[in-house]
Image (spheres, rainbow, N blue to C red):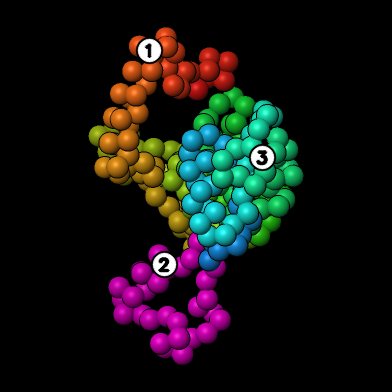
Amino acid sequence: FGRIVEFHNDLKWGKWHGFWVGKGREDYWESIEGKRCVILGTGAIGQKLAGFCKAFSCSVIGFKRTPVESSVPGFDKVTTQLEEALTEADIVFITLPLTNQTKHMIAEKELKLMKGAWLTNVGRGEIVAEEALYSALLDGTLRGAALDVWYIYPEKNSEYGHPSRYPIDELTNVILSPHVAGSTWQAVIHNIEQTQKNIETYLQTGTGLYPVNLMELY
C-alpha cells in the first residue's frame, strides 16, 4: 500500500517524486510497519502471512468461524467475532476459500466497520460483495485495496476481459493482479513436494494430509 505502482508509472514518463524534487508530505506513503493486521482465515496461508506481518512488527489478529482450542502460530489472538476483528484493523487480509458460508461475508455493513483500512484479497473474489467493494473504494470508506482474485474471468482461449462489472480497475486506490499470487516456480516445487508427502501419508495412515471437508465443500 505504498505508492510504488504510481511512482513507477510516473518515472517511466520522466516525472519524479520525493525530496529529490523538493516534494514533502504530499509524496509520503504508508508502511505496513506496526500496523494492526487482521487475517480472515488461519490455515496454512493465513499462518504464513501472519509470519510476514510479524517481520514488520505488526500485531496480528486472526478470524476463524469455529473456536480454536489452542494458540495458532503467528497470531497474537484468534477470534470468532468478525465485527470485533474488523473494527480493530488497519489492514484486512482475506485468505479464505469460497463456500456458502463465506460468500459475501464482507458486504456493505462489514466494509463500513473497516473505515480507513486497507483490504487485500487473495482468497476468492465473491467473498467480498462486488458492488459494496466498489462503493467503499469510491467513497473512501476503504483507503485502498490490493486484489488478486476477481468476479469475472476471461473466456477460454482469451487473454482479455474486465475483471468486474464495476470500473474497479479505473480507481487510483487499487492495486490489481490477474489471479497470479501463486504463479511462481517455487509454488510449483512446493505443490509437487506437498503432493508427494500427501500420497506417502495416505499410504502410511489411510488418511491424507488435507482431506476435503464435504460439509464445508472445500
Q: Which mark is on residue 204?
A: 1
Answer whether residue 189 is visible to the viewer in this image.
yes
Q: Which mark is on residue 70?
A: none
- Say which of 93 and 58 sits in front: 58
Residue 39 picture location, percent across and down: 58, 44
**Residue at 30% from the left image edge and 23% from the top image edge:** 196
Answer whether residue 117 is visible to the viewer in this image.
no
Q: Which residue is mark 2?
A: 4
Q: Is residue 142 above or below residue 83?
A: below
Q: Earlier in the sequence, mark 3 or mark 2?
A: 2
Residue type for callout 3:
Val
SS class of the residue under badge 1? helix
Q: Left or right of 27: which side holds 191?
A: left
Q: Nearer the viewer, mark 3 or mark 2?
A: 3
Residue 210 picture location, percent across and down: 45, 22
Q: Is residue 136 above or below residue 41?
A: below
